[in-house]
Image (cartoon, rainbow, N blue to C red):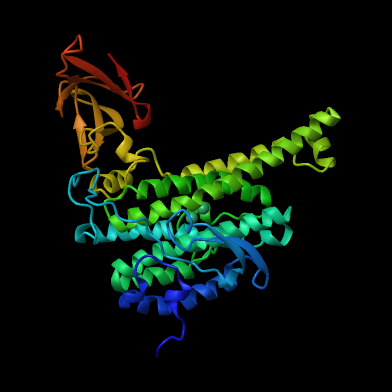
Amino acid sequence: MTSNIDYIDKIPNNVDLGRDRVLQRALEHWQPAYMGWWYDMGPNESHNYDVYLRTAISVDPEGWAVFDYIKMPQYRWGIFLVPPTAGREVNFGVNKGQPAWQDVPGEYRSMLRRLIVTQGDTEPASVEQQRMLGMCAPSLYDLRNIYQVNVEEGRHLWAMVYLLHRYFGRDGREEAEALLDRRSGDVDNPRILGAFSEPTPDWLAFYMFTFFTDRDGKFQLSSLAESGFDPLARTCRFMLTEEAHHMFVGETGVGRIVQRTAEVMAENKIDDPDHARALGVIDLHTVQRYLNFHYSVTLDLFGGDVSSNAASFYTTGLKGRYEETKIDDDHVLGDATYNVGTVRDARGAVAFFKGSDNKGYFLHVGDEIYDGRIVSIDPVSGTVTFRQRVDDPRQIKPYRDIVKRLTPLSEEEAQ
Ligand SMILES: [Fe+2]
Ligand SMILES: [Fe+2]
């Protein structure tokens, strides 16, 4: 059966969709399912209204934000990658220096698919979480903003589904379908990450979500934009252009609420939350509670401080650090270790480390590791001191001591 939808016209793209038969065939199945999902789970009772929206029709400055009135189901969800950079390389990890991968490296296939699916899953999830909010928007301005965010999260789903269809064959198509089957908050088939199955029941929650969770979104996209898998990097880089507005919606939303509360409190010279509420504003205690909640569930999205996933995504070159290429180090981090814990054995204190190669190491005082040796282990404070040899004529001493604590973030140097 041939489809009577002209996908090339309906789906603005710069991936030569007209010529890509494999992708077209995959989309012929997925696109109607996506529309079914949008009608069911997109903004409630919004389908028949004209909304003033920006649509990306190309990646250049004139094309990525074209404004017009459109009914949301007719929104043109496009597929865009920023143009390739000639000679781009894998910029970090053990594969650093190889030409960036234009195809999925076989040995990293499942890891890469998981990264793309996890990112893709968050996009429809947030639309589901927010679907009732249009029923009671504070203003037309806010209503337009949430719809803008929603259609763009829909486009972000398209971006990830493009990668699954284009590069992952049959299991990519299955994953793309599953992205439309899971539901935020569904006990049987929930979204993958916890923060995306929490309800967003009101506008303060929405502003907090766009303030914190979209910020995490920007961070994650920035990390994926460094990927050695070039199509993923280029897709995510373009998605970042839209993320700024989502964060703007959160920041100005929270800002307006706090400002109005502060104004009413100052005018009436009150600081009792009950008084503030009686005067029709959201008291600061409530704002604080929302903030605590959204901040916490968003922090959970980063996973543990000691994460073997993050280490292997990095080491393999699939997911970099924020602005990886601007960081001044070797981008391999082969000697970066996580101090996982300290215990004692018959020979004294033992430090257990996990290296970026994902292997565990038991180390005693005096043991050599990388370019230095361990000079002390303090099980009480959970700190380990390395004496690293340095070959730097500007240094007074031919070594420097590096103190590692239980979390890699609090690494300190003591000369
Ligand atoms: Fe998104
Ligand atoms: Fe977003």
Residue 372 in view here: yes
- Percent of width and height locating residue 216: 47, 45
Tag count in the figure? Answer: 0
Residue 286 in view here: no
* Quadrant where the N terminus is found in the figure: bottom left
Residue furthest toward the bottom? 1
- Percent of width and height locating residue 23: 34, 74
Quadrant in the rendering for residue 73: bottom right
258 vs 316, left or right, is right
* Quadrant where the C terminus is found in the figure: top left
Quadrant in the rendering for residue 257: top right
197 vs 304, left or right, is right
Q: Nearer the viewer, residue 198 or 268?
A: 268
Residue furthest toward the top? 396
Quadrant in the rendering for residue 287: top right
In this rendering, is residue 394 above or below 92?
above
Q: Nearer the viewer, residue 63 or 233?
A: 63
11 vs 18, left or right, is right
In this rendering, is residue 3 above or below 80?
below
Residue furthest toward the front? 62
- Percent of width and height locating residue 187: 53, 63
